[in-house]
Amino acid sequence: MFYNRISEKSDSNSFHTPKSRKIILQESVSERKLAAIGLLFSLAILAVKLYCVNYETIRNFVFERKLVSYTVLTQNGQIMFTNTWETAVRFSKYWFPLLCGFFVTYFTWMCVYLDSNVPGINPPSPLSPQKIRTKSGHTFHLNYVFAVLVGILVTAYMYVKEISI
């Protein structure tokens, strides 16, 4: 009987409040993320090291089997790079304003999102679930419309002024 009471009291769940359980769960999630990032970083280091150690073997495999000669490849590469760059510059009056408008929209959207009281919840973003938007009382926050509008205005201004590379 006494042993049962001690084991009930020493149950690991009885010492934690709901708030401390949430903190422990958050710590374990962040530890998993940190472990995954560390694993990816170490695999990247191993891949680069293997490439550097076997650089000559890889180069000999590609170039010495007469699949392609090095001079032809560099000449063709220079021609291709020049052609690609000329094409990109020629059409930059179309894609450059769109790219700049997208980045301005993204930056403004993130400023609004991170400036909110609880990001994504109060005020909710348009991408938040419906139950969070109706629960908070804000079905759609106008600052997000402002972010999209700023991106559209930047794109339109760059088109009108013909800003390109």
Image (cartoon, grey):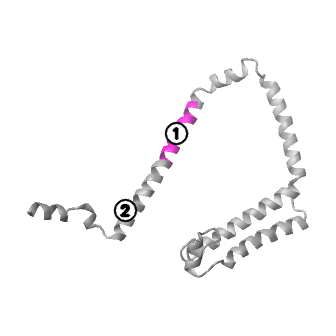
Q: Amino acid at mark 2?
A: Ile
- Give how far across and how far down residue 137 sits, in percent: 59, 82
Q: Residue 121: name its quadrant.
A: bottom right
As drawn, is 33 to the left or to the right of 24? right
- Image position of 55 (left or right of 5): right
The picture places residue 102, in percent across and down from the top left corner, at 75, 63
Q: Residue furthest bottom?
A: 137
| Residue 45 coordinates in the image, percent (x, y) | 53, 39
Q: Quadrant of the N terminus?
A: bottom left
The verdict on residue 144 being magenta is no
- Choose mark 1 or mark 2, whichever is in front: 2
Which residue is depicted at the point 78% across and 62% down?
100
Image quarter in which the C terminus is found: bottom right
Q: Which residue is pictured at 55% across the width and 40% down the height?
A: 44
Circle on res. 24:
2
Residue type at numbered disc 1? Leu
Q: Which residue is mark 1?
A: 43
Under tag 2, what secondary structure?
A: helix
The relative height of residue 75 versus residue 97 in the rendered view (above or below) is: above
24 horizontally vs 59: left or right:
left
Q: What range of the chain is rendered magenta?
A: 37-50
Residue at the extreme left? 2
Label 1 – label 2 distance at C-alpha: 28 Å
Residue at point 80%, 28% (across, down): 73
Is 41 covered by the magenta stretch? Answer: yes
Label for residue 17? none
Q: Earlier in the sequence, mark 1 or mark 2?
A: 2
Magenta-colored segment: predominant secondary structure: helix
Nearer the observer, 64 or 156? 156
Location of residue 7 by image quarter: bottom left
